């Protein structure tokens, strides 16, 4: 009986031990299966295959194009802009890089999906387009002589050239002259060797200084020409009437004292024409003399003046009285430059001309002592 009890107790304990081991084994197997599933999910679900430039790679689920570019260390760089000879014109001025998913261009923030085919197109160098233009070559202007009377020696003619220009940079790539230009030749002439001079005054009329100068000239019985500014003359038409009535030449000096060297023909003609109207309104007749401000010289200036019936006149003696030196200095400068047939330029407007008024009697006296007589511009021009 004792033996049987012992054996039964032993068997009962063994059976209980076996029953306790079974759940442990089950847990181990379940853990292994769970691990395998997690690895599977991690590899299959969390990482997805995409094609990058025809090579399949694994990327984390939810990755953007930018993430892949960073991960794969791809450099996106714009191409350069080059000229027709391959010279660099502008760094990264070429075609931008592009990113495409299944053939459609996308942004760097696009999210990639399983099986997407990603193509990254690098930036491409481009050669700038060339524009072909036909341009006019303006003729150069040459002036000969030192006299005051300006005339046309040769009208010349413009040339023509074909210019190839880079459309992006505006750079001139090449030029081909089809026809060369011929220069304009202007002549400055002195029309006499006689001991005569002509006095001229610019930039008036001035209500203060012009009457004083007229009074001196009338007292000395000396002719002169006044080249008036149209905008000034419009304010003082009575002074112009007095000039014309007492035999003084009223010349055209543009309406606004514009420098005409680079002006168009229409601008030049407009300045002269507008002033002519002012002169005709005040005096009843137009002028037949034109002086360009600053002594600008061009074919367009001479031709525009001619169309208005004016001859173009400059000067040959300039004491620079507009800079307001002393009266003695003005007189000395005139006498140092004087020559037979001289045309002297002085100023009755445009600023303080008190020194010019004071210098005028000195100049008259000094020139007479040198044997010079005073004549009108027309008399000098016609004495050739």
Image (cartoon, rainbow, N blue to C red):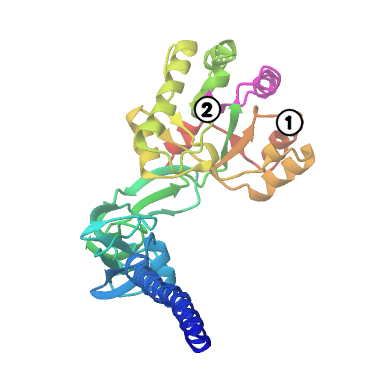
Q: Answer with the quarter of the image where residue 177 lies.
A: bottom left
In the picture provided, is 32 more to the left or to the right than 375?
left
**Residue drawn at point x = 64 percent, y = 32 percent:** 347
Look at mark 2 in the image and give the residue it sits on.
256
Question: Where's residue 119, x and y in %?
Answer: 26, 67
Q: Residues within 10 Å of mark 1 (few under 14, many from 20)?
A: some
Return the x and y of residue 108 as percentages of the image width and height. Answer: 38, 58
Name the N-terminal-most of marks 1 and 2. Answer: 2
Cβ–Cβ under 8 Å for marks 1 and 2: no
Judging depth in this view, the residue of 370 and 276 nearest the camera is 276
| Residue that lies at the very extreme toward the bottom in this rendered image | 3
* Residue at the image position 49 percent from the left and 80 percent from the top: 17
In the rendering, at what x and y percent does residue 338 appear? 62, 47
Q: Quadrant of residue 233?
A: top right
Question: For the residue labelled by badge 1, is the local secondary structure a helix, a strand or a loop?
Answer: helix
Q: Please identify the quadrant where the C terminus is shown.
A: top left
Viewer-proximal residue among 199 and 203: 203
Q: Residue at x 47, y 16 (%)?
A: 278
Examine the structure image and report whether residue 216 is included in the region drawn in magenta.
yes
Q: Foreground: 341 or 17?
A: 17
Region rendered in magenta: 204-229
The nearer-to-camera label among 1 and 2 is 2
**Drawn side of residue 103 relative to residue 316, left or right:** left
In this rendering, position of residue 16 left or right of residue 37: right
Res 90 visible? no
Please say whether residue 207 is one of the residues in the magenta stretch: yes
Dividing the picture into quarters, in which one does residue 62 lie? Answer: bottom left
In the rendered view, tell whether residue 299 sits above or below residue 271: below
Classed neighbour count for the residue bearing mark 2: other residues with Cα under 10 Å, few (<14), some (14–19), many (≥20):
some
Disc 1: which residue: 361
> Which residue lies at the image location 55% right of the left edge and 41% below the top edge?
294
CA distance for labels 1 and 2? 30 Å
């Amino acid at each position: 009986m004792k033996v049987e009890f012992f054996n039964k107790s032993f068997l009962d304990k063994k059976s209980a031990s076996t029953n306790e081991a079974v759940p442990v084994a089950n847990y181990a197997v379940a853990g292994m299966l769970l691990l395998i599933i997690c690895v599977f999910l991690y590899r299959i679900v969390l990482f997805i295959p995409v094609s990058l430039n025809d090579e399949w790679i694994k990327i984390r689920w939810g990755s953007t194009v930018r993430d892949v570019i960073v991960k794969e260390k791809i450099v996106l760089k714009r191409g350069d802009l080059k000229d027709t000879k391959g010279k660099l014109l502008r760094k990264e001025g070429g075609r931008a890089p592009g990113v495409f998913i299944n053939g459609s261009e996308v942004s760097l923030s696009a999210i990639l999906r399983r099986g997407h085919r990603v193509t990254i197109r690098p930036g491409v160098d481009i050669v700038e387009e060339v524009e072909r233009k036909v341009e006019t070559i303006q003729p150069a202007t040459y002036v000969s002589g030192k006299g005051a009377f300006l005339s046309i020696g040769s009208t010349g003619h413009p040339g023509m050239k074909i210019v190839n220009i880079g459309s992006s940079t505006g750079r001139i790539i090449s030029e081909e002259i089809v026809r060369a230009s011929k220069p304009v030749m202007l002549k400055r002439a002195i029309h006499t060797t006689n001991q005569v001079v002509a006095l001229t005054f610019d930039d008036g009329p001035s209500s203060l200084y012009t009457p004083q100068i007229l009074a001196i000239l009338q007292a000395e019985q000396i002719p002169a020409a006044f080249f008036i500014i149209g905008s000034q003359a419009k304010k003082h038409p009575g002074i112009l009437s007095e000039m014309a009535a007492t035999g003084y030449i009223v010349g055209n000096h543009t309406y606004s004292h514009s420098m005409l060297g680079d002006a168009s023909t229409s601008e030049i003609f407009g300045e002269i024409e507008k002033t002519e109207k002012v002169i005709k309104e005040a005096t009843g007749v137009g002028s037949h003399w034109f002086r360009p401000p600053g002594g600008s010289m061009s074919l367009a200036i001479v031709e525009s003046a001619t169309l208005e019936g004016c001859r173009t006149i400059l000067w040959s003696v300039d004491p620079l009285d507009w800079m307001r030196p002393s009266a003695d200095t003005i007189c000395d400068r005139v006498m140092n430059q004087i020559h037979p047939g001289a045309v002297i330029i002085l100023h009755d407007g445009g600023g303080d001309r008190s020194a010019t008024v004071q210098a005028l009697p000195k100049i008259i006296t000094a020139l007479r002592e040198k044997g010079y007589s005073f004549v009108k511009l027309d008399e000098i021009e016609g004495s050739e």
